[in-house]
Amino acid sequence: MDRETVSKVAKVARLKLTDAEIEQYAADLEDIIEAFAVLDEAPVVEEYDLGPIKVEDILREDVVCRDSDPAELREVMGTKDDWVRGPRLS
Amino acid sequence: MTTFPTADQLRSIDERHQVFCERLEDPLALDQGTFHFSAKDNLCSRGFQARAGSRILKGYRPPFDATPIRKLRESGGLLLGKTNMDEFGFGTFSTNSGFGVPRNPFDPERSCGGSSGGAAAAASLIPQHVALGVSTGGSISCPAAFCGVIGLTPTYGRVSRWGLIDYGNSLDKVGLLTRTARDLERYLPVISGPDPKDPTSLTQPVLDMRGEVETVAVPDEALVGLSPEVAASFREALKELERNGVKVREVKMPSLRYAIPAYYILATSEASTNLARYCGMRFGAMNQEFDQGFNDFFAQTRSEDFGPEAKRRILLGTFSRMVGFRNRYYMKALQVRQLIIREYRRVFDSCDAVLTPTMPFVAPRFDEIARMRPLEMYQADFLTVPPNLAGMPHLSLPCGYSHGMPVGMQAVTPQWTEGSLVGLARFWEEEFHYRFPEVMV
């Protein structure tokens, strides 16, 4: 994997990497991806799923309840005057 | 000969350890028929931080208990503390934590294994202790083997994942690390069962704690690349099983060669999406530089507080899911998972369990780990990844000692048959004498 690909992937993943990190990850990922090419030899399987067991959509009833104490959640989020603080939108 | 630190030396390490010892020795706790347990740091609980070994979650104190912790507490369990781990579970040696490195109770120059390294150390050091661990690709089996304890990873979906800080949602499983089969018998039924808060737990059949292992299959592919001491201990364990009437069969499982790439692609793909939530705004490490734009604000916290292995796995997972690579890597990995499930099922037609060593070598020294390339570390998981990929329950048991270091063997049984593994653990501890470091009383 070349440096340019690593930089592109890092941008998608919202990671700012130093030049040294880009260099290192390019080498590591090249090594890894090359070894993983063995997957090309694996037989094609027509029927497969996203997980190892069958999962059915069993949903909970809609019941109005208080799951967590809002005051506790505000404390975890470090709110100011009960507002969650974040960066500028632009 | 290894010298172990005395109880007094351990107590002096730091204040947190002092608190830990006081809790452990609290006469009220044990005299009233309760028990003590610990939880891997990626399980949320009241009263403790949940950092999952990551600086990005430093200071996060969840206002709720993960379901397995709630159930153990409701059964009279005293949560002693949280155990160290590789950041978000990303590692084989517990050397990727943002908060120090746990040391192997048999030799402090060696790794506990990972990623539930702290859990295995706790189970090994503290008599009658039950440690909650989590496995995604072998994170219970590996440290159990390196620290000489029993590690049970249940079927995917057997134990609720509610309150677990996700690594790979289709792979994560909460399990137990302990010294005795009796603890598995006691605590697996407590933590198991359907939980409306985790839909993947809802289709499970009732837990049946009966079962035994009479015939084991040993795949040829699992005997390649072992260190001589692990190969010798495993051969000896097979002989011991045969002496006790267990039938041993050699089988071939050619699909196992695809397990490592398939696992690392699925696990990192899921991890890279799960880790998108850490943005420095809602919990854990809080970015205070609100003048930045969104992307810079997020990228700053993530770049500063994720460790090197977390970044490596985010990059690999993001790459695997990108347009142009998705079919070649991610979709193929899903197919391989199905292939491996089918292969296990074929073997289970004529055998009760698949048996292999747990890890290809005994716990390595930290200087040896420092010289390993990332790919080599990933490849060290080639025996623990297949059952994890297939969602099959598995158990690591101590099966030998080489120069004082424990060797583990791993049994895999069909989905939902944890009872057979517990039966095997019960049978094996009658035949084989386990050793534990004598540190605490």
Image (cartoon, rainbow, N blue to C red):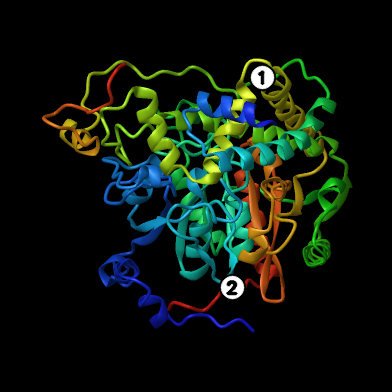
The image quadrant that residue B347 belongs to is: top right
Q: Which mark is residue B106?
A: 2
- Across and down, in percent, residue B118 comes to 49, 59
Residue at screen point 28% across, 25% down: A87
Q: Residues within 10 Å of mark 1 (few under 14, many from 20)?
A: some
Q: Between residues B404 and B315, which one lies in front from this camera angle?
A: B315
Given the image, on which type of amino acid does mark 1 rest?
Answer: Arg
The image quadrant that residue A33 belongs to is: top right
The chain that hosts pointer 2 is B
- For the N terminus of chain B, the image quarter is bottom right
Residue at screen point 61% across, 30% down: A6
Indicate which disc, 1 or 2, sits on the residue closer to the N terminus: 2
- Count of marks overlaid on the render: 2
- For the C terminus of chain B, the image quarter is bottom left
Tag 1 secondary structure: loop
Q: Between residues B322 and B143, which one lies in front from this camera angle?
A: B322
- Across and down, in percent, residue B427 comes to 67, 61
Residue tagged 1: B326
Q: Residues within 10 Å of mark 2 (few under 14, many from 20)?
A: many
The chain that hosts pointer 1 is B
Residue at screen point 83% across, 23% down: A43
Residue at screen point 67% across, 76% down: B404
Asked if residue B25 is positioned above or below residue B46 in the image, the reply reads below
